[in-house]
Amino acid sequence: MLNYYLYPHATSKKWVTFVHGAGGSSSIWFKQVRDFKNQFNVLILDLRGHGNSKPTIKDTFKSKYTFDSITSDIVEVIDHLKIEKSHFVGISLGTILIRNLAEKRPELVQSMIMGGAIIKMNFRSQVLMKVGNVFKSVVPYMMLYKLFAFIIMPKKNHKKSRLLFVNEAKKLYQKEFLRWFKLTSEINPLLHFFRTKDIKIPTLYVMGAEDHLFLPSIKNIVSKHLSSSLFVIENCGHVVNVEKPETFNHRTIGFINSLA
C-alpha cells in the first residue's frame, strides 16, 4: 500500500486528498497542510516509487505501471481508511490520476481541484515526449528530468518550483523513472477521452498565467464542460501551489466551502 499522511480534524466531516505529480512527493504540499488541516480532514499520498512509497525487495507494486493501476493504488488507501467521499486536489500528472479516479469510482469524488492541470498535449509537449522516448535508456534520467522541468517551467520566477521537483526526482531510481515514463504511451487516448466527456463533478482548474504548455487547452475545456471553472494566477507558472501558495490556498478552500 502507498505511504500516506493523515491530519484528522476534530469536528469536520469533510475530507481533502492531495495527489502529487510525477517526480514529486507528498512534501510538495507542505505549504497547503496548515491551512487545510485547520478546516478539513487531510490525506496526503506518496505515489508508487515516490517519497516513502518505495518498492521493497519483494516489490509490492508488481502490476504494470498504467494510469489504471496507479489510480487503483489511491483507491486502495481511500477504501482502507473507509473514507466515503473526498475532495481531491492534484498537481500536474496528479490531475490525470484524479480525473481517472472520478471515472472509475465517481461516488468517492466530491469535487476536483486541478492545479497545473494536463488535459491535452500540445505540439511542444508531444515533441518533448518523443525526445524522452528516444533518449530515456541511454541518457541519465536526471538530465532528461532537468530538461523537462526547464521547458515546462522556464522563467526566473519558476526556479523555486523547478528546484523542488528536480530535488524530489533525485530520490527516484533510473528504473523507476523509466516505469513512469512509459505511461506517456497511453496518455493521449486517455486525455482525448477526458476532453470529450463532461463528468459533471464540480471541478476547479487553477492555472498559472505563464503555464504556456497547458493553459490554452484548459481554457478550451472549461468553455465546454459545464461543471468546470477556471482561476488563473498571474505571474505564475505550472506548479501553482508552490509558486503562489497563499492565493492557491485561499481560492481552493473557498471553492470547497462553497459546495453543499
Image (spheres, rainbow, N blue to C red):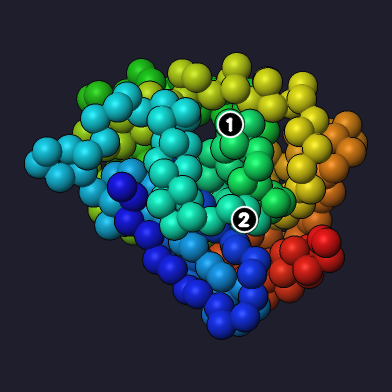
Indicate which disc, 1 or 2, sits on the residue closer to the N terminus.
2
In the displayed structure, 73 sits above or below 248; it is above
Residue at 46% across, 48% down: 79
- Look at the image and tell me in which quarter the C terminus lies: bottom right
The residue sitting at 80% across, 30% down in the picture is: 198
For label 2, the SS is: strand
| Dot 2 amino acid type | Ser
Point out the residue furthest to the left here: 57
SS class of the residue under badge 1?
Answer: helix
Residue 60 as seen in the image, left or right of residue 189: left
How far is the residue under mark 1 from the one under mark 2?
A: 14 Å
Q: Is residue 127 left or right of residue 2?
A: right
Front residue (pair 234, 256): 256
The residue tagged 1 is: 104
**Residue 238: % across, % down:** 61, 51
Which label number is shown at residue 4?
A: none
Residue bearing mark 2 = 86
Q: Look at the image and tell me whether residue 20 can be seen.
A: no
Percent position of residue 94, x then y: 53, 45
In this orientation, does residue 214 appear? Answer: yes
Res. 64 image quadrant: top left
Identify the amino acid type marked 1: Lys
- Between 55 and 120, which is closer to the camera in this rendering? 55
Horizontal relation, residue 239 to residue 256: left or right: left
Q: Residue at x 36, y 28 (%)?
A: 65
Quarter of the image where one finds residue 215: top right
Task: Report crowding for label 1: few under 14, some 14 to 19, many 20 or more residues within 10 A (C-alpha).
Answer: some
In the depicted structure, whether residue 70 falls above or below residue 251: above
Cβ–Cβ under 8 Å for marks 1 and 2: no
